[in-house]
């Protein structure tokens, strides 16, 4: 790593924004001041989601990660953290780019909620049709 004590990156998904700090360490992940399993309420899918960049690159036990995440829901936040961790790992070692790119971890997921349209109940749900 460079002369900094940590590497910084930002990850985004839906309306969630995660600021990631990657420190040399033992593999602890702290989200908004709490351990990741506690923050995500033990949902294993979110645990697996945010540790995926570390697993793919084989660096699960090399870094401690602190995260500040705001906005969105639980799933969006987990996706934002995953995106941020992948970007931070890239700053640590540029040679990880092909591995992370192959796993599609560097691409920001651009899917967001579609706006509600006039005359409809939601983005696409129309009011019930009555013939008589």
Image (cartoon, rainbow, N blue to C red):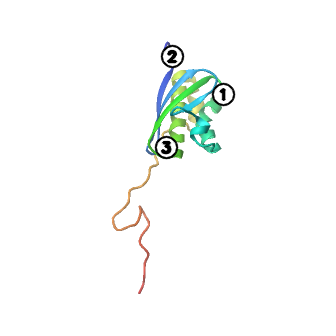
Name above or below for residue 115 compared with residue 45.
below
Q: Residue furthest bottom?
A: 132
Residue on which disc 3 sits: 109
Residues at marks 1 and 2, CA–CA distance in whole angstroms? 21 Å
**Which label number is shown at residue 58?**
1
Q: Quadrant of residue 95?
A: top right
Neighbour class for label 2 at 10 Å: few (<14), some, many (≥20)? few
Residue on which disc 2 sits: 5
Circles 1 and 2: CB atoms closer than 8 Å: no
Residues at marks 3 and 2, CA–CA distance in whole angstroms? 29 Å
Q: Residue at x 55, y 26 (%)?
A: 89
Name above or below for residue 105 compared with residue 95.
below
> For numbered disc 2, what is the local secondary structure?
loop
In the rendered structure, the answer to whether residue 71 lies left or right of residue 39 reads left
Residue 101, visible in the rendered structure = yes
> For numbered disc 1, what is the local secondary structure?
loop
Name above or below for residue 61 compared with residue 126.
above
Which badge, 1 or 2, is on the more N-terminal residue? 2
Residues at marks 3 and 1, CA–CA distance in whole angstroms? 23 Å
């Amino acid at each position: 790593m460079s002369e900094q004590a940590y590497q910084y990156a930002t990850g985004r998904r839906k309306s969630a924004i995660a600021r990631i700090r990657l420190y040399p360490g033992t593999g602890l992940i702290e989200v908004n001041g709490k351990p990741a399993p506690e923050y995500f309420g033990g949902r294993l899918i979110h645990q697996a989601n945010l540790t995926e960049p570390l697993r793919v690159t084989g660096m699960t036990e090399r870094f401690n990660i602190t995260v500040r995440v705001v906005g969105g829901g639980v799933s969006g936040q987990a996706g934002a953290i995953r995106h941020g961790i992948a970007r931070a790992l890239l700053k640590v070692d540029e040679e990880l780019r092909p591995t992370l790119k192959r796993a599609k971890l560097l691409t920001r997921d651009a899917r967001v909620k579609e706006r509600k349209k006039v005359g409809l109940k939601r983005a696409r749900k129309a009011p019930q049709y009555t013939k008589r």
